[in-house]
Image (tube, grey):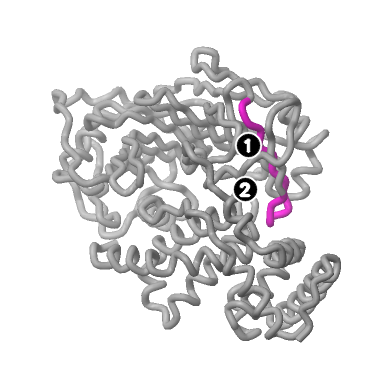
Amino acid sequence: MDGGVVHALLKTVAESEAPATTVDIGRAAATGRRNVRLRQAAVACAAALTALVVVAGAGLMLGSRPERPSPPLEVAAPASFETLVQYAEFGWLPDGLTDRTIRTEPDVQRLVASARSKTGVDARMVELAAVPAGHTIELEGGSDADPVLGRPARWAVVEGGTALQWQYASGAWASVTVWDSTDPRAVARHVAESARFGVNRPIRLPVRATGLPQPFQLASVAVTQSTATGGWSAELGYSDTGKRTDLGDWPLSLVALNSSMRTGDGGTVGDPNTTLDGHPARRSDGADGGKGLQVFDVDGVYLELATHAPATTARLPGGLDALFRGLQVARDPSGWF
Amino acid sequence: MRGDDERRYVEYVSARLPWIRKVAFLLCQDWHRADDVTQVAITKLYTHWRRAAAADNLDGYVRTVVVRVFLSERRTGWASRVDLRAEPLDEAAAAEADPAMRLAMREALAEVPPRQRAALVLRYYCDLSVEETAEALGCSAGTVKSQTARGLESLRRALDARHITVEA
């Protein structure tokens, strides 16, 4: 078989009639924009991720301004964060941000308040994160800022936006970045001054994995809830090695979404190709050597379980099927674990 | 990204999206996955747009990003990326439009292991040299040669099994 023949074959296949695309350029730009900001932060503070508060979207308007808050009680920043404990919380926020996300890992916690947008381009978003004691934030183009509640602060340049960084506790930093606002510094300062730290509130989850073998530890949590739609999603990362894979994944991941869909979404979620315990399901193999299992409509919840390395799959007795059967799921937030 | 840069990014991706999808489809052999790979690839492109735009061969840069996303594809998509649509993707209709031969070729290509398939697509669809393919795949020229040879053999077996003769 020579190259010309293979070329002709590939060209024939490539000319297959394509269905309507689900690719969203606006969403790519919005996500890319956010990645740029996070990358800058990550580069700047080396091993530690940084704290960011981002307000994205044109035409952001200030909500009703509160009275200048009293300085919060002095808190002692921990050396690391607990995965299932919320450490910081928003105080004041601009109006109209209906969704809330919390993302936790040992070395960073991020809170996100956002407004939904079909394209993502104009999505307004506020992200607050904090890093534990001993980590610094050094973004590019920094300049001195007036103290935040009496603590050292500085403005930093973030692509297209303005970041306010400050010490929320002795030796520990947080940051507020305002994106595409008509008055970014005012928004950043108000969000920063009203943020609270050391709240130490348990994080409840819509899904609980029972029967995971000893090596696996919960390494990251991300939970989103929408007050506008009542929707929620949860992404949990587990590690059996204490670190991510070379491709940046936690070795075992679990996604739960409050959706009773029984087919794919035409984009991220593929259609079922099998059933599991009466539920539509999809099995897949990853290029990273891991296995994937998607199970649709488990009491109104969509689930994705995936390993990202063959060794991780091997450490799961009964594989992903057994892991799925050991899950406890609660669609109603009042019943979360 | 400045406004001019953002405009150029959108213009480029809008113009080249059909081509990017085709490359992704040849790699994935599945339009769902191809769109997913494309989405991730153009997101990465945005992140590195300044460097990409300054490259001598922007298409080549993008092609490399697509291949690497394909090879490192994460199956667990972020829930925030899920777009629950009222109407599912009409892949069945697209499949019906394929001649039987084209479908058989797709099936045969899908049987070629991913890295070997990537080598074939880059060498024979994108017309890259061995050295250029090695750069895109992040491996040595020798590995490209061996992956290509194995890919051709895998493809030949898959085609033979379907009684498809493609010899020149």
Classify A220 as above or below A329: below
User: Which chain is indicated by disc 1?
Assistant: A
Relative image position of residue A208 (x, y in whole percent): 63, 24
Q: Answer whether residue A287 is magenta in the image.
A: yes
Position of A155 with respect to A16 (left or right) is left
Q: Residue at x 82, y 66 (%)?
A: B162
For residue A1, above or below residue A214:
below
* Residue A118 point in image, percent of width and height: 35, 42
Camera-side residue of A5 and B140: A5
Residue A145 in the image: above or below residue B140: above
Dots 1, 2 in contact, CB < 8 A: yes
Q: Which residue does the numbered mark 1 point to in the structure image?
A: A304
Is A101 situated left or right of A115 in this image? right
Name the mark on residue A318: none
Quarter of the image for the N terminus of chain A: give it: bottom right
In the rendered structure, which segment of residues is drawn in magenta? A285-297
- Look at the image and tell me in which quarter the C terminus of chain A lies: top right
| Viewer-closest of A219 and A1 | A1
> Quadrant location of residue A123?
top left
Q: CA distance from mark 1 to mark 2?
A: 9 Å
Residue A231 appears in the figure:
yes
Question: Residue B75, labelled with which disc?
Answer: 2
Q: How many marks?
A: 2
